[in-house]
Image (spheres, grey):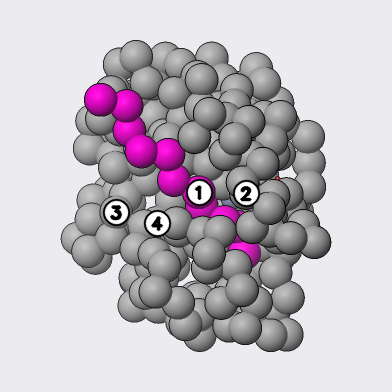
Amino acid sequence: MPKKILIATSTLGIDYGRLNEHMKELEPVADWFHVDIMDGNFVPNLSIGPMVVERMETEKPLDCHLMALRPHLYLEALAKAGAYSITIHAEASLHLSNDVDKIRALGCRAAVSISPGTPIEKIAKVLPKLDMVLVMSVEPGFGGQKFMPEVLEKVRWLRAHYPNLDIQVDGGINDETAPLAVEAGANVLVVGSYLVKAADPGEALKRLKRAAGL
Ligand code: DX5
Ligand code: ZN
């Protein structure tokens, strides 16, 4: 039985000046909100931190993508701020296995992300205890970048070996690339600019779903 496809709508491009109003508008096109947290070190961009996550008023699960060095420093604050799921980067964590255990102990779903150049071997040891793997399809740091189809090989391998794992793809997802990600075995699609910048997000989502056969 194939896993249900979920849309994780990215908050990176939202209007933070009217945070909750804009999130309310996007709720119909979001199974989860994908909250991009950037530290200006691991990635060359700064976004928001746990204090802003705490102010998000939504019924939708908050899927927090932590693009930060030494992620262990922020786990507790993020869990307290209401994170449903916390994703840390394999390249940024000092003790990946410990950090994954800590996320679990805080009551959140645990996920690890790999950037486009990072092989699956890097997360081999923690894979069996993860709820989700995030395969980045752009270099982390900015929205609106072009999808890198070569990362789909990693998605295919993961799906073949871990049929029940949630596999998320993030970066450059639109009505042309979503079908490729789904075909490779991804079941959680992060969608940023394609939805958030659309004149009619509802129509854009319908187009994407139709293209991906959903
Ligand atoms: C990039 C972020 C993504 C980004 C997706 O570092 O992790 O979540 O916001 O945006 P789009 O869909 O525009 O590539
Ligand atoms: Zn992200």
Residue at mark 3: 109
Residue at mark 2: 205
CB of mark 2 within 8 Å of CB of mark 1? yes
Residue 69 occupies which quadrant of the picture? bottom right
Residue 17 in magenta stretch: no
What is the distance, in whole Å, between disc 2 and disc 3 at their CAs?
A: 26 Å
Residue at mark 1: 7
Q: Nearer the viewer, mark 1 or mark 3?
A: 1
What is the distance, in whole Å, between disc 3 and disc 4 at their CAs?
A: 6 Å
Q: Amino acid at mark 4?
A: Ile
Sequence-first disc among 2 and 4: 4
Q: Residue at x 29, y 54 (%)?
A: 109
The answer to whether any part of residue 38 appears in the image is no
- Please state the total of marks drawn on the protein image: 4
Q: Nearer the viewer, mark 2 or mark 4?
A: 2
How far across and how far down the image is residue 23, in percent?
A: 58, 74
CB of mark 3 within 8 Å of CB of mark 4? yes
Sequence-first disc among 1 and 4: 1
Element carrying mark 3: strand
